[in-house]
Image: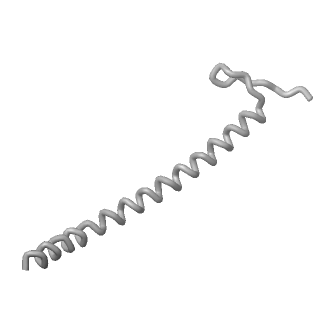
Amino acid sequence: MNQQLIEVDGERITVQELIDRYHHALDAEKRLKKEARKALRRRRQEQALKPYQAELIRMQNYLEDT
């Protein structure tokens, strides 16, 4: 079977290989976006807790001083 070759960035590949690479890139992008969303959610949760953590430290210092 004669497969058509195309040139991409100076490399000759088959159309099927180009399609496979495209799908692989899409999968990698989905994974990265999912990881980024999880990291952002974790960061927001940490930031939301900071005022409470500061209050707990003040209370602990007060209790240690009394």
Q: Residue furthest left?
A: 66
Look at the image and name its color scheme: one colour
Q: What's the residue at 24%, 72% (across, down)?
A: 52
Residue shown at 24% from the left, 69% from the top: 53
Q: Residue at x 41, y 57 (%)?
A: 40
How many dots with numbers? Answer: 0
Residue 9 is left or right of residue 39, and the answer is right
In the picture as drawn, the residue positioned furthest to the top comes out as 10
Quarter occupied by the N terminus: top right
* Position in image of residue 63 (x %, y %): 13, 79
Q: 40 left or right of 22?
A: left
Task: Answer with left or right where residue 52 lies relative to residue 26.
Answer: left
x 52%, y 52%: residue:
33
Q: Nearer the viewer, residue 61 or 40?
A: 61
Residue 31 percent across, percent down from the top left = 57, 51
Q: Quadrant of the C terminus?
A: bottom left
Q: Is residue 44 above or below residue 64?
A: above
Q: Position of residue 42 (x, y in %)?
A: 40, 62
| Residue 55 sits above or below residue 16 on the image | below
**Residue 58, percent across and down?**
15, 72
